[in-house]
C-alpha cells in the first residue's frame, strides 16, 4: 500500500480549505487517501494551525533587559538570650518494692527502673491516683517549659489562647 504524498497542488488545496474554515475531518474527506491526522500533521509542519495565520508570530517580541542578579544579604546574627536557669530536680530514690510488668495494676506508677533488656527491669510501683507516675517521678517527667519556648508560641502563630 503506497501512501499518498503531499504534492504542491494538495498543499495549496489544504491551505485554501483550512482558511475557508473547514475542519480537519472535512478536509480529509475531500482529499482522497488523506486522514484527519495527516491533515493536522501537515498543517502543524506548515505552521498553519491557527485559522488563516501562521502559528509562529511574525511580530518581533519585546525583549526584556536581563535582570540583575539578586544579591543575598547575610542574615544578622541571632540575638543571644541568656540561658534560662532550670531548677534541678533530684531523681527520687526508691528503696521500696518494685513492680514487674506482669504485675502492673492501673494504680501503679509506671516509671521504668533499670534497663529494659535486663532481667531485673521493673517499674516504680508506688500508688498513684489516675496518673501514670507518682508525685516524685511526675516532677522529673513534667518540667515547666523554659522562657525561650514559652515565649515563642505567644507571638500569635500556634498560640492557643481562648476568648478574652
Image (cartoon, helix red, strand yellow):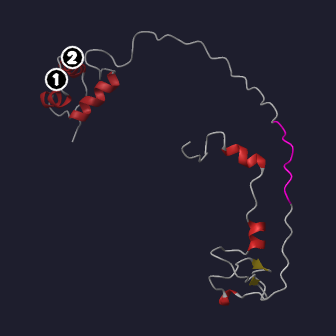
Q: What residue is drawn where x is 59% and y is 46%?
A: 161
| In magenta segment, residue 80 | yes
Mark 1 element type: loop
Mark 2 element type: helix
In this picture, residue 151 sits left or right of residue 84: left
State the residue position of label 1. 22
Residue lying farthest to the front in this orientation: 164
Which image quadrant is residue 90 in? bottom right
- What range of the chain is rendered magenta? 79-87
> Residue 56: horizontal and vertical position, in percent?
38, 18
Q: What residue is drawn where x is 77% and y is 51%?
A: 146
Q: Residues within 10 Å of mark 1 (few under 14, many from 20)?
A: some
Front position in the image: 91 or 9: 91
Q: What residue is drawn where x is 66% and y is 42%?
A: 154
Which image quadrant is residue 115 in? bottom right
| In magenta segment, residue 83 | yes
Quarter containing the N terminus: top left
Q: What residue is drawn where x is 83% and y is 81%?
A: 94
State the residue position of label 2. 19
Amino acid at each position: 500500500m503506497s501512501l499518498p504524498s503531499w504534492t504542491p497542488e494538495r498543499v495549496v488545496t489544504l491551505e485554501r480549505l483550512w482558511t475557508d474554515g473547514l475542519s480537519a475531518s472535512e478536509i480529509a474527506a475531500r482529499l482522497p487517501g488523506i486522514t484527519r491526522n495527516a491533515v493536522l500533521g501537515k498543517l502543524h509542519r506548515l505552521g498553519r494551525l491557527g485559522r488563516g495565520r501562521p502559528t509562529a508570530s511574525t511580530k518581533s517580541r519585546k525583549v526584556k533587559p536581563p535582570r540583575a542578579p539578586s544579591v543575598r544579604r547575610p542574615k544578622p546574627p541571632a540575638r543571644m538570650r541568656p540561658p534560662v536557669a532550670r531548677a534541678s530536680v533530684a531523681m527520687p530514690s526508691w528503696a521500696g518494692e518494685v513492680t514487674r510488668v506482669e504485675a502492673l495494676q492501673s494504680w501503679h506508677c509506671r516509671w521504668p527502673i533499670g534497663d529494659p533488656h535486663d532481667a531485673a527491669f521493673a517499674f516504680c510501683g508506688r500508688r498513684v491516683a489516675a496518673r501514670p507516675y507518682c508525685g516524685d517521678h511526675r516532677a522529673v517527667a513534667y518540667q515547666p517549659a523554659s522562657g525561650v519556648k514559652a515565649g515563642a508560641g505567644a507571638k500569635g502563630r500556634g498560640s492557643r489562647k481562648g476568648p478574652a
